Structures are given as structure tokens and as C-alpha cells.
Amino acid sequence: MKFVANTFALLLAVALLTSSSTASCFGTKSVLPKVQFAKSPLSSVSRGGSAIPEEGESLELGASTPPPVVSQPPLAPPVVVANSLMGSKSSPPGLLRRTIPSFPWHQLPNWLTYIRCLAIPALMVIFNMPNRHRETSAMFAVASYTDWLDGFLARRWDITSSFGAFLDPVADKLMVSTALILLTARYGLPIAIPTAIILAREIAVSALREWMAQRGARDSVKVGFQGKLKTALTMVALTVLLLVPYGGVEEGAVNVLSKLYTPGVVMLNVCAFVTITSGSVYFKAAAPILMGKDE
């Protein structure tokens, strides 16, 4: 019994020493971290029985306090897909692109090429209608303008596509060839001679480019200034010739437009001459490879 009493007394002493050392470490009263609050226009507003402290006052954690309000960053404006698909070197959006930002502007050059392809069968139909020379000429002029416009937009917006690069020159050649053949069938030899020269040059240069591409030297036969000049002159000459009424007589009176036939034929022959000179530039550039001198 005495041993039990001594053991109980020893445990009681250890418990008292432990509680006293713990109190000496933390103080007689445990103090929780304090949070500082900014001063509110309302001095003390009771919230669930506890007052919100004013500036300088402290509040023990664990008290009934409203959660702090976390400010969210403003949402970024929605990204316009049409403008984001432009190339890295694209020019800043103009008035139309700013006004209609959701329009797929990056597809417009290809759409212009499609319109030029659709204009070819329409040109054939209208050409054979009586007294539709104005409409035929206007349609060809608009199609020719789209040839320049789609290239201009593609360079300005820095957008390219493999299909567009293939279809654009094909559409140009089909449109020009169709107009030349139609005019040859109507006027005969004066149009047939420059037409044969122009078409022969186009076939030869196209074959040259294909062969050079297989050799990995297509860049040596790029379109130069003379080639662009030839294209512009040909389209102007064909627009003038398509504007001439067939037979030169309309409604019993000599039409002023019939006088455009001779200038149109002269311009077409000039185009044939430029066609020969521009084609010779391509063959001259490819001559070292054609003769095997680069090997």
C-alpha cells in the first residue's frame, strides 16, 4: 500500500511539473496570430454577435468572421479567330476588318480565285448571246481584277495555302485561253496568230517550270516583270476586244465601240511580242540546267 501511495505521488508530481513547463513556454494564456483590418467607414458592425474590429484592433483566428474577398482579374476579351489566322507579317486591320472582325478574311483570296473559275463557263454562255458584248467585257474585266486583288491581299495579310498557290495561275490561264479561243472563232486569222503564240508560250513555260521543279530549281524561273507586264497587257487587250459588238453594227447604226477592234488587235499583237521576250527570259535562266552545265 505504501508503494502504491508513493507511486501515485510521483506521477502527480510529474504531471504538475509538465503542466508548469508547458505554461512557462506559452504563457498562462495561449495567444493566437492576429489579423489586421483596414478601417471601415462603419465603426463597428455587429456580425453574428461579434463586432468587426476597427483599424489597429486585433482579432483571434477561429472567431466568426466573414471570409476575405479575393479580387478576380478581368476577363480577357474574346479572341477573334478570323484575325488571329493572319500571318505574322500581316498589316494592321483596316476599316473593313475592324468593322466585321468575325468575317473569315483569311479565306477571301481563295474565294476570289473560285469566283474567277466560275466566271469561265458564264463567259462562254454570255459571249454567244446577241448584243451582250458589254456584259461579256465587264465580266472578263472583273475576273481580271480579282486576279490582281487575290495576290495583293495574300501578300498584305501574309496568308498562303498550297491549294490557292496551285489554283490561282491555273484559273488565270484558263480564263485567258477561253477568251482567246472565243475571239479566234469569231474573227479568224487576225486573232488566231497572236492567240497561237500566246498559248504556245504558256504551254512551253509551264512545262519548263514543271521540269525545273523536279530538278529542285523552280525558283530560277520565277515570274518576272515582263511576265507580269504580259499578263496585264493581255487582259486589257481582251477586255477591249470583248467590248466590240460582233459585226460592228448595232440597231442599224455604226456603234462607237466597233472602232475599238483595230486598237484591240494591235494591243493583242504587242502582247504576243512581249510573250515571246518574257518566255525567252525563263529559258535563258534555265539554260545552264537544260544544257547540263551545272553538273
Image (spheres, grey):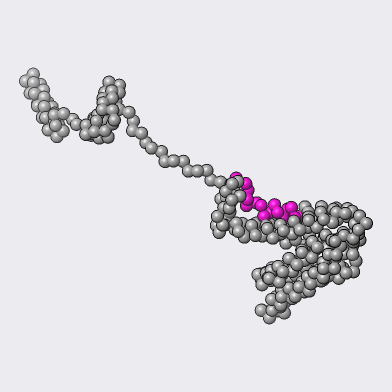
Counting from the top left corner in percent of width and height, residue 92 is at: 55, 55
In the image, taking residue 17 as reference, residue 226 lies left or right, namely right
Q: Picture quarter containing residue 227?
A: bottom right
Q: Is residue 260 visible?
A: yes
Q: Quadrant of the C terminus?
A: bottom right
Foreground: 42 or 199? Answer: 42
**Is 150 located above or below residue 75 in the figure?**
below
Residue at the front extreme of this rendering: 253
Foreground: 187 or 79? Answer: 187
Residue at the right extreme of this rendering: 252
- Residue found 85% across the figure and 61% down from its top: 256
Q: Picture quarter containing residue 165?
A: bottom right
Counting from the top left corner in percent of width and height, residue 11 is at: 12, 26
- Residue found 88% across the figure and 69% down from its top: 190
- Residue found 41% across the figure and 38% down from its top: 72
Foreground: 277 or 206? Answer: 277
Foreground: 270 or 193? Answer: 270
Range drawn in magenta = 102-117
Type of secondary structure dominating the magenta stretch: helix
Q: Quadrant of the N terminus?
A: top left
Residue at the left extreme of this rendering: 2
Residue at the bottom extreme of this rendering: 293
- Residue found 70% across the figure and 67% down from its top: 228
Q: Is residue 215 visible?
A: no
* Residue 105 on the magenta segment: yes
